[in-house]
């Protein structure tokens, strides 16, 4: 981890950081900060010369680089030594709210009830199942606690069970690079078979013959998932057949199976364009056929039901998407027929198929809506939700022939619930509500609401806010303001037991729904990307100014937080308006925008052109440079900052925050 603070003062991980900033000079030991050496490297593009003094930090194999990062960790430990007791208090407090011997709500698939559970004192989940009824003996599918032994890091990838319920494909990552080794387990004997496939995305799809599976592999350098292979049980992976190679480096390829179990489907998508191929699962040695050829700007996804596919798409300028239907025997886009029309004020986000019903996931005015419809044409209806700071979404529903919809609900102040809803009788059963242990939590002790700030261009930007009912709002009230704001990813209001440690100490939590996400529909995303990206940053700043002007807080007590692309947001706002914040948390921040987007060897770069633009084109280069946090660092008074990274992070490479911190310090 790498950490930076003004006046050479550092603060510990997120909560400790924010809570400690109020007393930043208390009991701190000032030591000499790590100083990275300067080795000037000129980077030239479009006749523009940028000098990067810390480019040398890009080499993780260089002992000097590792030594510098270790010195940063040592500095962090020394500078946060005074918070260690407080960290322990917080950790035990947070841990004390969590039910360690917890388990998921069982779901039924293909004759088995599947459960994920945890045991007290154990770090990893146990995946199990029961045949036909929950009273049947438990079968342990995977015990990750045993599998993780001897590894500093362990993650189990997607579990794919064969149609005859006898085999399970699974992926294992022990490096934290999201490069999974794919293996197969015999669920009847417990034996791990000899089949072993390296560098996959972690999951596999079984054909209906129970011996053929399809999986995706990654480019070992860029980590782009670009190839789909077919593997036959018991054969060496070196003989696997390549069935699809995505040669356009702006696309990623993946494979899955339709809920009907009739089709194996290959998807290939970029930010703006989609393409799918289908193969009947009963014919694994057949040839995939194109569903509808890719057309730049045409996005679609497909669900199979009866003899048709249902296509969620932006075809014909359906900005907020619509649902179309096409016969499975002639699937090109010219044959698509409108089923649910486009609506200017409703974003259509998804559809879930059942034998007698289908469920639409919609978003209107920022709020989740679930609409139940009958295939026989009966009148549809919406599930009722009463407040404005909630999240509701369709949960795990693998069973096709059922009238029960399982969905999840929570809000900033309401623990997560799993609910079974009878779509015919409209009766609902709360199967589980997240337990908050410790005896101190009560929903009625917290106030949650939605407010709207006015951005500098007159656009209204919503924020979801929560605080303890005893917290008095004013210039001395501390606020943690969070946002993401990229890729059309919507961060809905959600419950967090960890956040309670802030709220119970007088903090307000504000989630800013800025442009770049899709909270207010697809146009909200379009207005925060490419050559409009700065709207994301100015929205966040204007939300901060609103909180100050409306006397929720003051600049002395306002803290900002974001990670990954949200870390870019943090880097941009501290360059634009550092005076607004007493502290900023930038987690694995994407901050060296131009250099990264010009390096096609860096994981995920080329697929990002439709999000950020291609800096090989001067217009995008100039615009990126005008906001790139690393390029815009100047000598000024920056707020207290906590910056984190991971040496093997596959999304944002460690050297971006490392270089940024070095330049900020200089």
Image (cartoon, rainbow, N blue to C red):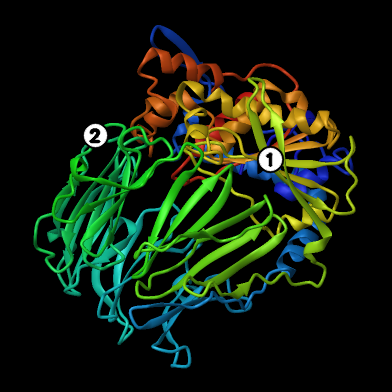
Residue 36 in view in this figure? no
* Closer to the camera in the image, 116 or 62: 116
Q: Quadrant of residue 359?
A: bottom left
Which quadrant: the C terminus? top right
Left or right of 181? Residue 286 is left
What residue did someone put label 2 on?
295
Report the disc number at residue 57. none
Tell me the crowding category of disc 1: few under 14, some 14 to 19, or many 20 or more residues within 10 angstroms, Cα based: many
Element type at mark 1: strand
* Closer to the camera in the image, 97 or 310: 310
Left or right of 479? Residue 623 is left
| Real-space Cα separation, disc 1 to disc 2, in angstroms | 36 Å
User: Residue at the spot x=67%, y=25% of the render?
Assistant: 455
Q: Position of residue 316 (x, y in %)?
A: 31, 34
Q: Position of residue 18 (x, y in %)?
A: 77, 44
**Residue furthest top in the image:** 47
490 versus 418 height, above or below: above
Q: Quadrant of residue 468?
A: bottom right
Element type at mark 2: loop
Report the disc number at residue 463. 1
Tell me the crowding category of disc 2: few under 14, some 14 to 19, or many 20 or more residues within 10 angstroms, Cα based: few
**Looking at the image, is mark 1 or mark 2 earlier in the sequence?**
2
User: Residue at the spot x=66%, y=38% of the render?
Assistant: 462
- Number of labelled discs? 2
Left or right of 292? Residue 546 is right
User: Residue at the spot x=51%, y=20% of the render?
Assistant: 39
User: Residue at the spot x=83%, y=56% of the render?
Assistant: 504
Q: Are marks 1 and 2 in contact (CB under 8 Å)?
A: no
């Amino acid at each position: 981890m790498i950490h930076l603070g003004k006046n050479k003062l550092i603060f510990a991980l997120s909560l400790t950081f924010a809570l400690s900033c109020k007393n930043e000079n208390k009991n701190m030991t000032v030591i000499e900060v790590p100083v990275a050496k300067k080795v000037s490297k000129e980077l030239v593009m479009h006749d523009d010369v940028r000098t990067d003094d810390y480019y040398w930090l890009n080499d993780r194999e260089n002992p000097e680089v590792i030594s510098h990062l270790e010195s940063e960790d040592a500095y962090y430990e020394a500078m946060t030594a005074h918070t260690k007791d407080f960290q322990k208090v917080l950790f035990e407090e947070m841990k004390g709210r969590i039910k360690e011997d917890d388990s998921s709500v069982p779901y039924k698939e293909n004759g088995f009830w599947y459960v994920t559970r945890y045991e007290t004192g154990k770090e990893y989940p146990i995946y199990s199942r029961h045949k036909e009824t929950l009273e049947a003996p438990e079968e342990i599918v995977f015990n990750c606690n045993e599998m993780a032994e001897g590894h500093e890091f362990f993650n189990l990838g997607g579990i794919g069970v064969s149609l005859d319920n006898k085999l399970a494909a699974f992926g294992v990552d022990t490096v934290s690079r999201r490069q999974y080794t794919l293996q197969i387990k015999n669920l009847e004997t417990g034996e791990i078979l000899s089949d072993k496939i390296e560098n996959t995305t972690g999951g596999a799809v079984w054909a209906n013959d129970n011996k053929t599976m399809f999986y995706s592999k990654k480019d070992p350098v860029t980590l782009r998932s670009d190839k789909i292979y077919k593997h036959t049980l018991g054969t060496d992976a070196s003989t696997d057949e390549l069935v699809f190679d995505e040669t356009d480096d702006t696309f990623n390829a993946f494979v899955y199976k339709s809920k009907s179990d009739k089709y194996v489907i290959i998807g290939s998508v970029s930010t703006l364009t989609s393409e799918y191929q289908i193969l009947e699962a009963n014919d694994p040695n057949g040839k995939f056929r194109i569903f509808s050829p890719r057309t730049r700007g045409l996005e679609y996804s497909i669900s199979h039901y009866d003899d048709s596919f249902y296509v969620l798409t932006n075809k014909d300028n359906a900005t907020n998407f619509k649902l179309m239907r096409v016969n499975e025997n002639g699937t090109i886009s010219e044959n698509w027929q409108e089923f649910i029309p486009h609506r200017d004020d409703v974003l259509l986000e998804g559809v879930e198929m059942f034998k007698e019903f289908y469920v639409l996931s919609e978003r209107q005015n920022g709020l989740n809506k679930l609409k139940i419809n009958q295939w026989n044409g009966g009148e549809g209806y919406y599930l009722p939700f009463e407040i404005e700071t909630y999240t509701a979404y369709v949960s795990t529903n693998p069973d096709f022939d059922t009238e029960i919809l399982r969905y999840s609900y929570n809000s900033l102040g309401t623990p997560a619930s799993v609910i079974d809803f009878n779509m015919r009788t409209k009766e609902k059963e709360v199967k589980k509500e997240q337990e908050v242990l410790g005896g101190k939590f009560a929903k009625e002790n917290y106030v949650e609401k939605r407010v709207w700030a006015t951005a500098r261009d007159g656009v209204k930007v919503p924020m979801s806010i929560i605080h303890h009912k005893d917290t008095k709002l004013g210039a001395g009230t501390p606020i943690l303001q969070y946002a993401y704001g990229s890729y059309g990813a919507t961060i809905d209001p959600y419950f967090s037991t960890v956040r309670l440690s802030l709220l119970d100490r007088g903090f307000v939590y504000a989630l800013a729904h800025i442009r770049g996400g899709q909270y207010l529909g697809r146009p909200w995303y379009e207005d925060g990307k490419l050559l409009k990206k700065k709207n994301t940053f100015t929205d966040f700043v204007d939300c901060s100014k609103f909180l100050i002007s409306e006397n929720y807080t003051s600049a002395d007590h306002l803290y900002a937080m974001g990670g990954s692309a949200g870390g870019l947001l943090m880097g941009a706002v501290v360059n634009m308006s550092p005076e607004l914040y007493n502290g900023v948390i930038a987690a694995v921040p994407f901050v060296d925008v131009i250099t990264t987007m010009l390096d096609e060897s860096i994981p995920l770069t080329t697929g990002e052109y439709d999000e950020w633009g291609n800096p090989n084109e001067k217009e995008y280069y100039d615009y990126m440079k005008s906001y790139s946090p690393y390029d815009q660092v100047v000598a000024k008074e920056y707020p207290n900052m906590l910056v984190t990274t991971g040496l093997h992070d596959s999304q944002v490479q460690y050297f971006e925050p490392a270089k940024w911190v070095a330049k900020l310090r200089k």
